[in-house]
Image (cartoon, rainbow, N blue to C red):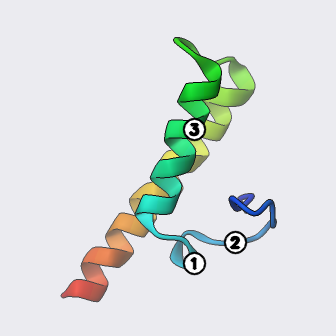
Amino acid sequence: MFASSSGAIGESASERSAAAVNTQIRALWARAGASLGPAEQERYQQLLVEWAAAVKADVVTAA
């Protein structure tokens, strides 16, 4: 389960585009600066998994 940009819990990767997840990744890094703390690292890993799933879904849809 992930929090969406609107704050809703439970929005899956298939419901958000890779671009939307990428925006969250960039915002996380912008807030954190040069390094991520433990909580930010965990969120970053979750976002990476979600982003990869969204990219895969886009590729499958395009095929």
Q: Is mark 1 on a helix, strand or loop?
A: helix
Asked whether disc 1 touches disc 2, contact meaning CB atoms under 8 Å apart, the reply is yes
Q: What residue type is labelled 3?
A: Ala
**Disc number for residue 47:** none
Q: Name the residue under label 1.
A: 15
Distance CA(mark 3)–CA(mark 2):
18 Å
Q: Quadrant of the N terminus?
A: bottom right
Q: Where is residue 57 in the image (x, y as percent from the top left)?
A: 37, 76
Q: In this view, does 6 lie above or below 26?
A: below
Residue displayed at 18% across by 88% down: 63
Q: How far apart are the alpha carbons under marks 3 and 1?
A: 19 Å
> Where on the picture, by quarter, is residue 58?
bottom left
Give the CA separation, mark 1 to mark 2.
6 Å
Of residues 38 and 4, the one nearer the viewer is 4
Residue drawn at x 28%, y 82% is 60
Reading the image, the residue beneath label 3 is 27
